[in-house]
Amino acid sequence: MAKKKTKCIGILTAGGDCPGLNSAIRGVAKAAMHYGIKVIGIQDGFRGLVENRFTSLDERAVSGILTLGGTILGSSRDKPHKMLMGDNIMDMTGVAVANAKEMQIDCLVCLGGNGTQKNAYKLSQAGLKIITLPKTIDNDVWGTDVSFGFDTALNIATDAIDRLHTTATSHHRAIVCEIMGHDAGWLALGAGIAGGADVILIPEIPYNLNSVAEHLHNRRRQGKRFSIIAVAEGVRSVEEIEAAKEKPKNEKKKESENNLTNADGYALVQEPTASRIARKLQQLTGIDARVTSLGHVQRGGSPSATDRLLCTRLGTTVGELLVASNYNVMVAVKGDTCKAVPLEEIAGKKKLVPENHHWINCGKLVETCFGDTL
Ligand code: F6P
């Protein structure tokens, strides 16, 4: 039997926003329209699908948004299978599927990070046809070389490190710069190398503060009177990891209940780790230390040229997949091409920095300390 032609798609953006979402919406919508497919926008991620909040995306609506930061559709971290409805958490999968069908959406295009890939996969299992794109400044989506949003954030964080260099040099200080990335170190690692940070701490390499202090001392001995320490928000010291292993489970639960986190368990208060590192380094070295937490600045503003190009490539590939009726896949970047990877291969996985990654070896060869050796 011939495959049914795609006549109408819905697009939503879910999870934390990032520069490039609008460029990707434009790429998907324009390519779909090129092939005669109607495009419907869904507001505020999966919540909009459950609450029937749709908007028409015609040629005019997606014109002039290539360079615009944020997302014209709005975003949320809501999951269809576990959604807060009033005071209750409910499984709204059935409603999401029914609403999409009611709107005659043949394929739901979801732009998001790891959480979105998982939610989209679940909806595909519940009967919706899905295509996803990999979006996140964390660059930790499994199955793709790179995610959109990463390059822009990398430029912002690198620029921040450049600026911190000049002030750290004037005052002979150590400056700890906290960089986003959730549990992955890609952003801190990339920006740290590009900005010439003297120390880079990432979650994939448990750090030892004495080793960092020793590196700062050595720099002083060599007449280098400033140091920049790039710290990924998810870092943990060797001692913290050991202590966590020994803690009884109920104590861990109590601790996390007391922490301020968002719906996905991301820390809302991001300052303490970097502050703690700065305070301890000052104690260990006697060097005047300061902290800068880049926070959501990394997710704001216009996408870089690289991200605009990437989003247009990824978005327009969706158009081609729609015509080929190739569903339940994520469009991944593989070298110079975009490839469809089955959602079931991606859902629930995370791409962390491998221990022997080329970027780490490069950093070591330019004398960057990763906090791992004494
Ligand atoms: O996943 C993107 C990200 O920016 C992470 O780097 C960070 O931990 C998290 O989102 C912050 O989430 P929110 O915007 O909900 O505070």
Image: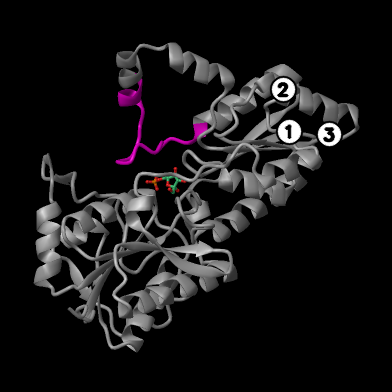
Asked if the magenta segment contains residue 67, the reply would be: no
Residue 136 marker: none
Q: How far apart are marks 2 and 3 (CA)?
A: 18 Å
**Residue that numbered label 1 is attached to:** 369
Name the residue at the front extreme.
Answer: 1
Magenta residues span: 255-271
Residues at marks 1 and 2 touching, judged by CB atoms closer than 8 Å: yes
Disc 2 residue type (three-letter): Ser
Mark 1 C-beta to ligand 1 under 8 Å: no
Mark 2 Cα-neighbour bin, 10 Å: few <14, some 14–19, many ≥20: some
**Residue that numbered label 2 is attached to:** 211
Disc 3 residue type (three-letter): Arg
Q: Where is residue 119 in the image (x, y as percent from the top left)?
A: 27, 51
Disc 1 is placed on an element classified as loop
Residue 96 shown left or right of residue 309 in the figure: left
Q: How far apart are marks 3 and 1 (CA)?
A: 16 Å
**Residue that numbered label 3 is attached to:** 225
Locate the C terminus by quadrant.
top right
